[in-house]
Image (spheres, rainbow, N blue to C red):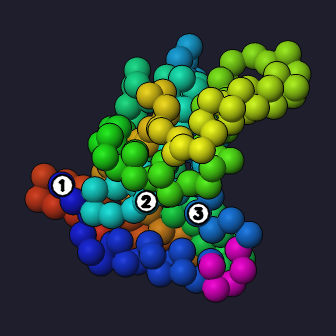
Amino acid sequence: MVIPAHILQEFRNCMDAAVEAGELEPTSMTVASPGLTGGVSARTVLLKALDERGFVFYTNLRSNKAKQLAVKPQAALVFHWKATRRQVLVEGTVEPVSDQEADGYFASRDRGSQLGAWASQQSDPMKNRAELLKNVVVMEARHVGRPIPRPPHWSGLRVIPHMIEFWIHRNNRLHDRFRYTLGKDGWNKQRLFP
């Protein structure tokens, strides 16, 4: 089921306010996922797309997070905007984006980032920084004078939410919390105690 326009707009309003307030990295979000050996794993990535289908980020599919999400495709996202004292929590299932979406986004990246996607063996052990820089030089030589294609091991993941919670700071810990939950009859809204 798609995210209703009013919930998307509420999220976009939070993001716009963070941008206007000068938040250093307003698209930054923490992604938490089930660990491969139990427990939970978390890392910070950047939101790259948002529409009625969900929240999209891109990654090396050989990375720890991609491996974890392939085994158990469930994630939580946390957006925290210190400048506006707001947070949004998203919980949902994860699916890969289409090849067309991944190709389109990859083509929009600067050439250095494209080379980096080929050069990095993300999450694998590395002897030293020189090893990574050597890989960049090799990839650069391989693609001189022509566009860099998207690596087969690099794509996007979409978090399809079943819960979105908005948290707004108020004095004396009397914060506003609103939770939207997807049920069999659509999205339901609840106000929560802070």
Which stretch is magenta?
19-23
* Residue drawn 40% across the image and 25% down it: 70
Q: Secondary structure at mark 3?
A: loop
* Residue drawn 52% across the image and 45% down it: 147
- Circle 1/circle 3 CB separation < 8 Å: no
The residue tagged 2 is: 49
**Count of labels shown?**
3
The numbered disc on residue 1 is 1
> What's under tag 2, amino acid-wise?
Ala
Q: Secondary structure at mark 2?
A: strand
Secondary structure mainly formed by the magenta segment:
loop
* Residue drawn 52% across the image and 77% down it: 14
CA distance for labels 2 and 1: 18 Å
* Residue drawn 60% across the image and 36% down it: 143
User: How packed is label 1: few (under 14 Cα within 10 Å), some, or many (20 or more)?
Assistant: few
Quarter that holds the N terminus: bottom left
Residue 2 left/right relative to 89: left
Q: Earlier in the sequence, mark 2 or mark 1?
A: 1
User: How packed is label 3: few (under 14 Cα within 10 Å), some, or many (20 or more)?
Assistant: some
> What's under tag 1, amino acid-wise?
Met
The answer to whether residue 24 is above or below residue 71 is below
